[in-house]
Image: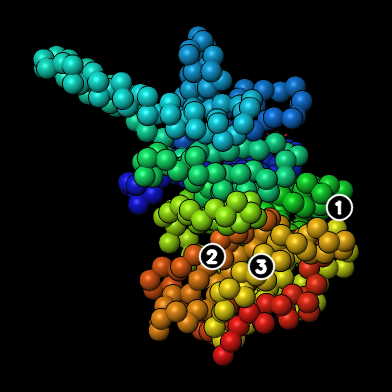
Amino acid sequence: MNETQKNKVVPITVLTGFLGSGKTTLVNHILHSNQTELHGLKIAVILNEFGTDLGIEKKMMLPFTTTTETQEQRDGWVELDNGCVCCTVKGSLIQTIEKLMKMEKKKKKKKNEFVVQTRSEEVKEEAKEDEDETKAFDYILLETTGLANPGPICGELWVDDALLEDNMENAAVLDSVVCVADAKNIERQLEEHVEAREQIAYADVIVLNKADLVETEEELRRIREKLESINADAKLVVSERSKVDLSQVLDQKSYKGNVKSRLMKETKETTTTKRFFAKGAKDLAMRIEESSKSSNSNSIISKHDETITTVCLTAKGFVDKEKFENWIEDLLWEKRNEPNGADVLRCKGILKCKSKSDAPPLILQGVRDVYEITDGFDGLKLQEDGLSKVVLIGRRLRLDELRVGFESCFFL
Ligand SMILES: Nc1nc2c(ncn2[C@@H]2O[C@H](COP(=O)(O)OP(=O)(O)OP(=O)(O)O)[C@@H](O)[C@H]2O)c(=O)[nH]1
């Protein structure tokens, strides 16, 4: 059992990708995979089909055990044949997740009351069986619709403190965004649909699926380059039938807590919440380094206003945190409202600070207008070049302007 499971933090992976790309195929792969047994994960699947009218109930595509109607089915939950559960969001997503977490608690409470009221050996035996039946969920997979923009969903999941109750006892936290791309059709989809571009932009992991339908290596390389030109920071995994190594898509720890949003500033909200994602910082450091290597001055300037691109900024010296906060807040909160202003969808970064000698760098994470700056964990180091780095993914990102603003937040 890993640290996340021990602490009872339930990670949420948002699964996105254009219509027909292979999301449900990936969910099925995760639910059926032998590797799932290795992870020992008990998974809840949430299908966010709100607003679509495809005429197909997605739950039909997943494995069921029972045909008789249970309380869970009446409530919109269905038990799958591997003990996992599945539901379709009808109302608010946060309420659905809260309901799921409470469902788990209610079952535990029932068991405790039962044990207190009884003493005989016979009943103790029954209580033990009950305990096995009501094992907690370890993981939530949220499959969004093929036309969904994952930005607002991630923002909602990331900011909502209601999911962090009971001193982390039953907390659910955003882990990462996994986007499945249909290798056969993704180029055309990116041309024609803003949703397809946004889905790639928000991804922490891109599963480039249906590789069997791509005829040549050259074509696959061109598609990879296209995806990297939009989001140079995401990990890219090529697959057929969404068969990926689960360690590439689950438990990625791409997000951290202590978020800051315009709303919090306006209401003078200062409370912060604690989450446990120190390990993710190391992956983030490596990925920022990778994307800065792959970015060059030609590939990172927008050619077209609606084109989503990645910009990687680097700076020498130490960050002036207050200046940096002002710069990033102006960028995330003001610029997007200006005509022709930058529209940052996702940002991540590592910032060298001078608070104490040998202090680990600070970590930046952001989704649209919500961001956080947290202390890196002990042992986290900048890459060999010693530079602070920020990766921005979005529209109308003018490199020269951004570079000047970013560098002005540092002193030697
Ligand atoms: N040839 C091929 N077909 C695939 C692959 N992966 C999935 N499919 C097929 O593609 C179709 C769509 O897959 P789904 O998993 O339902 O896609 P989805 O993203 O959930 O679809 P929507 O719910 O419409 O957005 C199904 O018929 C799958 O069997 C693949 O790698 N190669």
Image quadrant assignment for residue 167: top left
In the depicted structure, whether residue 408 falls above or below residue 291: below
What residue is shown with label 3?
328
Check disc 2 and give the amino acid type: Ile
Check disc 3 and give the amino acid type: Ile
Mark 1 and mark 3: Cα distance apart in space:
30 Å
Residue 191: image tag: 1
What residue is shown with label 2?
373
Image quadrant assignment for residue 405: bottom right
Q: Nearer the viewer, residue 306 or 40?
A: 306
Q: Residue furthest bottom?
A: 412
Q: In which quarter of the image is the C terminus?
A: bottom right
Q: Position of residue 96 (x, y in %)?
A: 55, 30
Circle nearer the viewer, 2 or 1: 2
Q: On the rendered structure, is 105 left or right of 391?
A: left
Q: Nearer the viewer, residue 77 or 324?
A: 324
Which element type, helix, strand or loop, lies under badge 2? Answer: strand
Q: Which residue is drawn at 49% across and 32% down?
A: 98
Q: Residues within 10 Å of mark 3 (few under 14, many from 20)?
A: many
Image quadrant assignment for residue 9: top left
- Going from N to C along the chain, the mark reached first, 1 or 3, is 1
In the depicted structure, whether residue 111 falls above or below residue 222: above
Q: Which residue is drawn at 71% across and 53% down?
A: 200
Q: Evaluate whether residue 209 shows in this view.
A: no
- Going from N to C along the chain, the mark reached first, 2 or 3, is 3
Q: Where is residue 164 in the image (x, y as percent from the top left)?
A: 45, 43
